[in-house]
Image (spheres, rainbow, N blue to C red):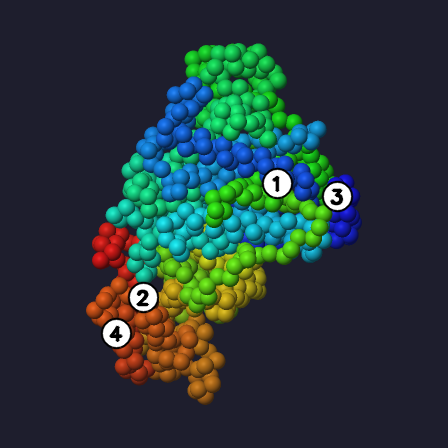
Amino acid sequence: MAARWRAMLERLSIQAQGDPAILADHVARQAIDLGMAFRHTGDEEERSWPLGPVPLLVDAAEWAHIERGLIQRADLLERVVSDVYSTQALVRDGKLPASIITGSPHYWRVMTGTPPPRGHHLHFYAADIGRGPTGEWRVLADRVRTPVGVGYALENRLALSRATGDMLGAMNTRRLAPFFDELRRGLAADCTRADPRIGLLTPGRFNQSYAEQAHLARYLGLLLVEGDDLIVSDGRLFVRTIQGLKRIDGLWRWMDSRFLDPLAFDGQSRIGVPDLYDACARGGLMVSNWPGAGVIESRAFAAFLPQLAQAMLGTDLILPNIATWWCGQPRECDHVQAQIDNLVVGSAFDQPVAGLPHTHFTPGSSLDRDQRAALFDAMARRPMDYVGQEVVKLSTTPAIIDGQLTPLPFTLRIFVARDATGRWRVMPGGFTRLAGHGDIRAALMGRGDMSADLCVVDSSPVPPDSLLGGGTPAIRRVGGMLPAKAADNLYWLGRYIERAEMTLRLIRAIVGGSIEADLGPSLASPTMARLVDQLVLWGAVPGRAGTVGALCATALGDARQSGSVRALMATVANIGEGLRDRQSSDVWRLVRLPLPGFDPAVTETLLDASARLIERMSALSGLAAENMGRTEGWRFHDMGRRMERAVNGCRLIALFGGDDASADDLMVLLDLMDSQISYRTRYLTGPALPPVRDLVALEPHNPRAIAWQALRLADHVAALPTLRADGMPEEPRRLAEALAARLASLTGDRLTMTDIADVENRLLRLSDAIGQRYFLQLHKTQDADMLS
């Protein structure tokens, strides 16, 4: 194995040209390109994923031992959970104290006597393991509630493969794709229908690992859903889509049991699905893992797993626990207090307890005399709330820190999943966590921690594989279902991108057309005054006062102004976070790019920043036009852009295309509507009111004209699914077709401002109708219609 390590490090050194920092930067860029991100608790913004470029190598023989140990452990945990929620023979026979179960916040009595489909409480299991200095592996923690890290393990492999070329293949690294294929088939096997619809239930985009969840949903072909997307009716679970309610056969949940159903578990939950328990109890829904399975995650359980293995499996654990003493037993409590300097002490059930600063483990040696006295006093009152564990001494693996190869202690999170036959499969790799200065036993990444890929290497070449496995899926030419919330987000993503672009065009018109440096209370020209007033109306600037530079700088970069470009792009990023499973990494990268720098006192920098941002908007438009499949999702995104462009067009025509419009007004209008070239190619004279109005309002072949937007809106609405069985048009289609007909009947020489006001009102009514029909605004009435 030493030879493999040397060969790998030599190859990485060659690629880094002798500078490890170059390699680290290259891998970090690949992680960013893949959209890898996470949050610490309390973070408002996502952080880039801290992936190191040096993988951890484990040979096949050592891995086989780990596999056997984790499969045995998964079997044991399944049997324990099954007993807890059925006969409770372990408690009755004295093999497990009742308080170990009832003291856990993850035990739910309501689930007793509610067996899962096919008897599988666990479909997915993860274990944190560590290797001691002498090479032995031990289990630090069992995790069944949320499988955090499995997506990052996949993304780590993808990023490292991109960064290192064929290095992993040359080392005979086992591939991860077959594991995910088995995982997906295993989830499907426990559903009642042959071709089930499975959702990945996420707490939402502010969850710490939302980026991981979105990536997994896209990779596995699962429907990414939140609680608001789902509804239970007659014991069946449905997802709200633009086509109506569609049945969900299974859920891979990424939220704690307490949040799943406010009627059965925690009544304060706002992210769950009312009556989800009823769907589980009737046997028509597969949930991974089954609600209440998290009871076995309690740290106190680790003290009893060795004897439970003997009682239930008739053998010792292949992978032993880290030594654990539950203080609910007098002798164990005395041992913890006597050996306090050599142990760490923590909450038995991962809840705040008296005498400890937090729920993580605290080294006993770090407590002073008064702190120990307070802890021992609390333990005397409620000893069952505490556990003691041996101090973890971990072996190290090389990592690049500040451009230097540095040894860091590590833990592995290894993932186990059921396949289609119900047998356990172990991912041939995993999530490597390199300790910074945080608690290495914590469930989530701590501050200063890093991650690395885990490579299981064979002595012979590994055959290529992909997520398709050995079978060939049925050919489909549909884009899949579109949940109502996703349609809502796509629509408003389009609207806010278009709104930001129009604000940039206004800024460019002001800066490019300014003559006076100080606008002051009397503006340089009526046209300039109207431009600034429009920024005020859109919330981009607070008022007229100030220089051109100051006003435009505010409209560009002042996040306090809701209509500024910075604020609008922040909204775009927030909406985009909820669409990570539907947007490419290129879109995500463009959205999150910082604004270009500029100097308010230098007009050229403001013009340059505006131009570069307009180019960025054009790139986003190009990605949508050329890369998005022509599915319902694309239609809603494009409808948002068409709606915003049409509404803004009405307002700009009212502002600059009125009956008393000057030549400057009309020139600005053509510029804002990006129709200067079209006008000049048709008319040899300067701008005149009727042809300008006709071009920007009524020209059906001008992609900036209001009429063109109306035609596209009518096309999109007509192509969307309908809930009516009588052939009559739904309200959005009726309004869209009437709008297009209204504009088709007009010409530029007869167009009035009353007509423009009427068109704007029609657009706003159409937008409301689209929202009420397709989005999540009328749950109760619409759900009844959708089920009929």
Please tell me whether mark 3 or mark 2 is closer to you in this view: 3
Cβ atoms at labels 1 and 4 below 8 Å apart? no
Mark 2–mark 1 distance (CA, rounded to whole Å)? 46 Å
Residue identifier under label 4: 738
Mark 1–mark 4 distance (CA, rounded to whole Å)? 59 Å
Q: Position of residue 180 (x, y in %)?
A: 53, 50
The quarter of the displayed image where residue 777 is located: bottom left
Mark 3–mark 2 distance (CA, rounded to whole Å)? 57 Å
Amino acid residing under circle 2:
Pro
Amino acid residing under circle 4:
Ala
Residue identifier under label 2: 721
Q: Which mark is residue 5?
A: 3
Q: Which mark is residue 432?
A: 1
Mark 3–mark 4 distance (CA, rounded to whole Å)? 71 Å
Dot 2: element: loop
Q: Is residue 384 left or right of residue 787?
A: right
Residue at 41%, 30% in the rendered image: 83
Please tell me whether mark 3 or mark 4 is closer to you in this view: 3
Q: Position of residue 92 (x, y in %)?
A: 39, 21
Residue at 52%, 25% in the rendered image: 310
Q: Is residue 145 left or right of residue 728?
A: right
Amino acid residing under circle 3:
Trp
Dot 3: element: helix
